[in-house]
Each structure stands twice: as C-alpha cells, then as structure tokens.
Amino acid sequence: KGLNYPERCELLVSGVIKSIFPVGLIKENRTKRGIFDTTGYIRLKDIKEISINELLNLIVMITIAFDRIREYPVFIEEMVISLDTTFVDESFSEIKFIIIDFSY
C-alpha cells in the first residue's frame, strides 16, 4: 500500500511520474537538497498576466496532472501546491510540480 523511503525516492528521481519534475537528490551531512531542471517551464509565481482562457486551461491541466499523480500510491496527499511549486510550459500546454519535502 504505502511506499518506503527508498521507493519514494526512486519514483522522484526516475521521472516516471510525468506531472512531477524528476529530482536530483544531494545529501550533505544530515541535510538533503533537491535539484530540478525546469528548463522550458515558467513558475506560476513569475507569470505577470494571463487571460481567462489561459486560467481555465491551467485549471484543466492541474486536474489532468493530479489524475496522473494519483496513479502512484504516494504524493497526492502530501503535495503542497503553490505558485512556487507549480510550473507551466512556455506554450501553456503542460503543467508540472516540484516536490519540496524530502523528509520521508
């Protein structure tokens, strides 16, 4: 049912969950940091203005992304969605999230 720590890390690192950016994990002493390649995507926080159609499209894309994430037995209940952790590609056709908590 639930995944243990190594299994969760493997899912995040592998990039198999299409709506979550793959993460490179760096361990320094007792601290873990995640590095994400968001090339080609814009953080929602950095978008200054969008049209109503783009907003509606974002809502649809978030719903589709959540459906993809729900296919895996982890993450959806633990995700924090914010303007800082949500990215849209430059053509406004795909949305992805970053996971910022690696304390599993």
Image (cartoon, grey):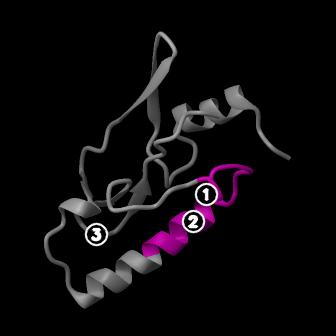
Q: Which residue is mark 1?
A: 69
Q: Are marks 2 and 1 in contact (CB under 8 Å)?
A: yes
Residue lying at the far right in this picture: please name it. 1
Task: Give the magenta range.
Answer: 61-78
47 to the left or right of 54: left
Query: Quadrant location of residue 95?
Result: bottom left
Label whose residue precedes the other's in the sequence (3 or 2)? 2
Image mark for residue 56: none
**Amino acid on which disc 2 is placed:** Phe
Ranked by sequence position, the earlier of labels 3 and 1 is 1
Q: Tell me the residue at 60%/61% (across/down).
A: 68
Q: Amino acid at mark 3?
A: Phe
Query: Which quadrant of the view contains residue 3?
Result: top right
| Foreground of the two, 99 or 58 | 99
Q: Nearer the viewer, mark 3 or mark 2?
A: 2
Q: Is residue 49 above or below residue 17?
A: below
Of tags 3 and 1, the one toward the viewer is 1
Residue 14 colored in magenta in the image? no
Query: Between 93 and 35, which is closer to the camera in this rendering?
Result: 35
Q: Residue at x 86, y 47 (%)?
A: 1
| Secondary structure at numbered mark 1 | helix
> Which residue corresponds to mark 2?
66
Residue appearing at x 25%, y 44% in the figure? 39
In space, the residues marked 2 and 1 are separated at their CA atoms by 5 Å
Q: Which mark is residue 92?
A: 3
In the displayed image of the protein, which residue is found farthest to the left?
A: 48
Contact, mark 3 vs mark 2 (Cβ under 8 Å) = no
Q: CA distance from mark 3 to mark 2?
A: 17 Å
Q: Amino acid at mark 1?
A: Ile
Q: Is residue 31 above or below residue 7?
A: above
Q: Could you tell me which secondary element the residue under label 3 belongs to?
A: loop
Q: Position of residue 67 (x, y in %)?
A: 61, 67
